[in-house]
Image (cartoon, helix red, strand yellow):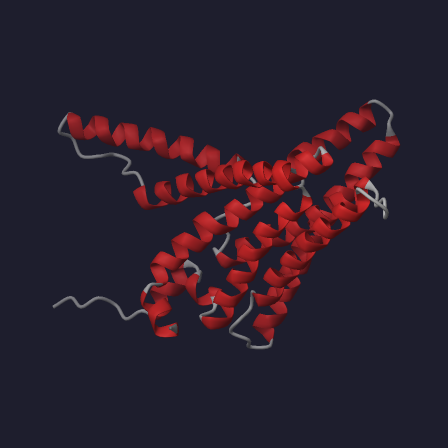
């Protein structure tokens, strides 16, 4: 089975990075809006909210939002520390623990949400902090996985990149139509990856809330299942090998023959 996964590494790379993890982020983020009224991975909006509250003199609300941003930061730090320590220890399977930790946090959110609706009455900030920590964890983990190429918990940069790529594609088509060599050739593989990530996030942001509205907090267990499957995959093959930065991959391969 491991040999089969090795042969299909390129397909697994695209599937894992561009379809599964953005979908998880979209489902968690959008479901968090229904459950808590906030986007738990939108740190730009949260920092802007801090500024708004400070300008209005509402220091209590500003402090609460700062704590939310802080938990996202702590999640990113935790993921980086776990991956870095695994690297220092020489472990090939570096992402199992962060994946399991994120699955545990989302499961904890589902459990606390269920009980907060009945007897435990957990406060809004505690649930929000749990999801923000999980999203910070995922974003930093995927940043390490992809060699700082991809983020999965927000789409601002990805949407910007898609716009840039679309203009390059347009100019490439115009140049070809005029019979001229393309001045700026579009990176179609990168463009396809970005669009796939965007659609995956949208799909997760649609399916996740739809399930949440149907069955409530247990819907958050769907992202948990995906994360557990990824942890199993990492234990079998090692996501670090699949997502080695392009320069490292190329350096590890023998140069092409010039004969």
Q: Position of residue 119 (x, y in %)?
A: 86, 46
Question: Which residue shows up at 42% across the image and 41% down it?
Answer: 194
Question: Residue 17, can we see it?
Answer: yes
Q: For this view, does 175 lie left or right of residue 17?
A: left
Q: Position of residue 125 (x, y in %)?
A: 80, 42
Whole-percent x and y of residue 225? 56, 56
Residue nearest the observer in this picture, 231 or 69: 231
Looking at the picture, does residue 72 appear above or below residue 88? above
Q: Quadrant of residue 237?
A: bottom left
Quarter of the image with the C terminus is bottom left
Q: Position of residue 180 (x, y in %)?
A: 16, 30
73 is higher (above) or lower (below) than 34:
below
**Is residue 102 or residue 186 the one in the foreground?**
102
Quadrant holding the N terminus: bottom left
Is residue 30 visible to us here?
no
Residue at the image point whose x is 35% and y is 73% from the top: 3
Residue at the spot 67% in from the left edge and 39% down from the top edge: 32
What residue do we see at 53% from left, 54% from top? Answer: 142
């Amino acid at each position: 089975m491991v040999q089969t996964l090795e042969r299909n590494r390129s397909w697994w790379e695209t599937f894992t990075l561009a379809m599964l993890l953005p979908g998880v982020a979209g489902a968690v983020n959008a479901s968090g809006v229904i459950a808590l009224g906030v986007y738990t991975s939108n740190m730009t909006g949260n920092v802007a909210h801090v500024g708004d509250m400070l300008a209005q003199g509402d220091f209590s609300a500003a402090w609460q939002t700062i704590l939310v941003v802080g938990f996202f930061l702590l999640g990113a730090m935790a993921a980086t520390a776990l991956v870095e320590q695994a690297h220092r220890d020489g472990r090939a399977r570096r992402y199992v623990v962060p994946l399991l930790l994120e699955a545990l946090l989302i499961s904890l959110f589902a459990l606390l949400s269920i009980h907060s609706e009945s007897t435990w009455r957990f406060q809004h900030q505690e649930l929000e902090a749990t999801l923000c920590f999980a999203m910070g964890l995922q974003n930093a983990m995927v940043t390490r996985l992809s060699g700082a190429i991809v983020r999965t918990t927000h789409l601002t940069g990805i949407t910007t990149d898609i716009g840039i790529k679309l203009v390059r594609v347009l100019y490439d088509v115009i140049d070809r139509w005029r019979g001229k060599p393309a001045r700026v050739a579009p990176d179609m593989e990168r463009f396809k990856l970005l669009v796939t990530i965007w659609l995956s996030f949208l799909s997760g942001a649609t399916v996740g809330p739809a399930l949440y509205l149907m069955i409530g907090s247990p819907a958050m267990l769907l992202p948990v299942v995906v994360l557990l499957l990824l942890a199993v995959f990492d234990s079998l093959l090692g996501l670090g090998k699949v997502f080695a930065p392009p320069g490292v991959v190329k350096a590890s391969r023998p140069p092409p023959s010039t004969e």
